[in-house]
Image (spheres, rainbow, N blue to C red):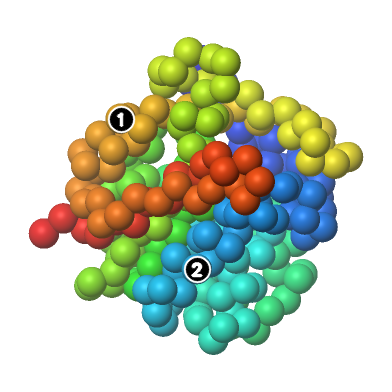
Amino acid sequence: MQHDHREQLGLSWQANADAWAAAVREGRIESRRLVTDAAILQAILALAPVRVLDVGCGEGWLCRGLAERGIESVGVDASAPLIGLARAAGGAGARYRVCGYAELASQAAELGRFDVLVCNFALLEEPLAPVLRALHRLLAPGGHLLIQTLHPWRASQDAAYRDGWRVETFAGFGEGFQAPMPWFFRTLESWLGLLGGTGWRLQWLQEPLHPQSEQPASLLLLLSAEA
């Protein structure tokens, strides 16, 4: 079943690439437009990085935003259609590569080291420990890992507050989405346990609030490598 979920997750990003790019670029996703895009960008800029790796970069909006500010950015994503859209959008100072999470460790020498590693709503699979361990090989001395994810208390909605697979239908994101996306829900306790167990130390935790509902729109974590 886990294999089926992971395969469907990958296929959804192949099928939905154009629709997702349109939703992001046209500002159709309210939480991103009002809260979370600015939250991750501000968190990165506060670290004053020279090189940033965007893991699960999608159509490349974050890499473009960083490049506009003079930061060398590299985006990797397993979806070839999304990487194609990112490259087509241009942006000097931003580079992209088709690369699944399982391939990160093997490509570390070619990718180089980064001051900041970013996973912005990109950690959607169940077995994340290998990915989080592999990221250490890409981190420059004194560097940081930034993770933004759905806030567990809000994302659980009416379902039981326990780890498990959920389904995103992209309702309200506009037309063109061809396939639902399975994703793995984690409680806050599970997130913190997973990170601590893979060699990451929490520096701070933020809960960016929606300006109207004043409810948390996401969970934002800044991490460093354990000594």
Which percent across, then down, holds residue 50? 41, 82
Q: Residue furthest right?
A: 175
Badge 1 amino acid: Glu
Which percent across, then down, holds residue 124? 51, 37
Residue at the image point whose x is 66% and y is 46% from the top: 212
Q: Is residue 109 left or right of residue 215?
A: left
Using the image, determine if residue 92 lies above or below residue 215: below
Q: Nearer the viewer, residue 188 or 25?
A: 188
Q: Secondary structure at mark 1?
A: helix
Q: Nearer the viewer, residue 21 or 7?
A: 21
Residue at the image point whose x is 54% and y is 86% from the top: 70
The answer, for residue 103, to whether it is visible in the render is: no
Looking at the rendered structure, the number of numbered marks drawn on it comes to: 2
Using the image, determine if residue 19 lies above or below residue 61: above
Residue at the image point whose x is 73% and y is 28% from the top: 169
Using the image, determine if residue 192 lies above or below residue 46: above
Which percent across, then down, holds residue 119? 47, 53
Mark 1 or mark 2: name the one nearer the start of the chain.
2
Tell me which corner region of the image, top left, top right, bottom left or bottom right, holds residue 26: bottom right
At label 2, counting other C-alpha atoms closer than 10 Å, the crowd grade (few under 14, some 14-19, many 20 or more) is: few
Residue bearing the label numbered 2: 42
Label number found at residue 189: 1
The answer, for residue 43, to whether it is visible in the render is: yes
Q: Is residue 217 left or right of residue 202?
A: right
Badge 2 amino acid: Gln
Tell me which corner region of the image, top left, top right, bottom left or bottom right, holds residue 227: bottom left
Residue at the image point whose x is 50% and y is 51% from the top: 208
